[in-house]
Amino acid sequence: MEPVELNNQSRKTLLNITELTIRQLAGQRLMVGFEGTQLNADLKFLIATLNIGGIILFTGNIENPNQLKTLCTSIQDYALSQNQLPLFIAIDQEGGQVARLKAPFTIFPGNSEMKNRSDAKQFAEITASELKNIGINMNMAPVLDVTPRDIQSIMKKRSFGSDPKEVAEMGGTVIQHLQKRGTMAVAKHFPGIGRTVIDSHLELPELDIDLPLLESSDLIPFKEAISHDVSGMMLSHILYKHVDPIWPASLSPIIAGGLLRKQLGFENIIMTDDLDMDAIKNHFNIETAVKQILSAEIDIALICHKGPDIEIAYLEILNSITSSRDMKDKCLSSVERILRLKEKYLMD
């Protein structure tokens, strides 16, 4: 797929945040899923009314390469027709057990089966080429979780392994070659979930480890990702009791704003993992989650399934930034980061 062509007015809007409406500022903070395989009424509502900043695709949205290319093209064309910004169109294409695209797309065995940097480079080059050809511009990969040998990690088959330096090298290679070919990479799951044995799709795991231990191991690959200018970081739904005893990483000002943004100096976008996962749903309503996300200066709330939470989240963001100058200023900073990436990757 050729890059989406933007008219001069759209280019100007993308470069000048002051020309965005307050509703557009709110919508840019959301990346959402939808049901269907073509541009439908639900998608049009998300784009034109909720002004969403991004879409994430799942297996149910995919029939074949031609259909998928038509879907991605129609999403961007419709956004342009509604005077909206181009959208992030994301997918989880890690290879192995998490790969939304099946044959005839290239099938890779996954991170745990990669032997060297050549394997990582090949995966990234082929995957980026295939994604770009159909109009997907963001890959929710690579997984940078370190999985210690003495733990039955939930991430074992999705990880590059137990050596933080090896994980960093392989992950850095994937990031470099995805982004070199025009596909934004999103490293996950900060600050590392390789030590977890409970699936956060089902419950909120707690890790009894402190920051020095994270710094000596789990954070090493994420620091490498930052050195490669990774486009995004996805936060985990894990409670790190000795770092922030109250909020999981995905809702934590200490972890997102403090550790990742200030201490590690990450300047691109920070997003949550899916807020529909039971680690969040079982403990926090969507209004509380959104308030925490805004306070933590997390840029994008990810909501992967159709439902009322998407509109509730949008209205909560809109209300927050219209009623609080501080929240609006934080929102402007987040949207500036989002626009920088859209300018870099979507305006060729």
Image (cartoon, grey):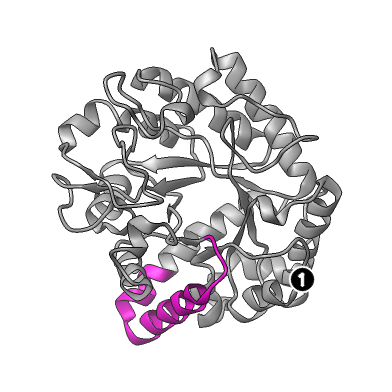
> Looking at the image, is 228 positioned above or below residue 101?
above
Q: Which residue is mark 1?
A: 78
Disc 1 residue type (three-letter): Tyr
Whole-percent x and y of residue 123?
A: 64, 26
Q: Secondary structure at mark 1?
A: helix
Q: Is residue 311 magenta?
A: yes
Secondary structure mainly formed by the magenta segment: helix
The structure residue drawn at horizontal position 30% and vertical position 61%, both measured from the top left corner, is 296
Tell whether 347 sits left or right of 268.
right
> Looking at the image, is 5 positioned above or below residue 175?
below
The structure residue drawn at horizontal position 55% and vertical position 18%, both measured from the top left corner, is 114
* Extreme residue in the right direction: 66
Whole-percent x and y of residue 81?
A: 78, 75
Q: Residue 213's image quarter? A: top left
> Looking at the image, is 324 positioned above or below residue 54?
below
What's drawn in magenta, residue-wise?
A: 304-331
* Extreme residue in the bottom direction: 323
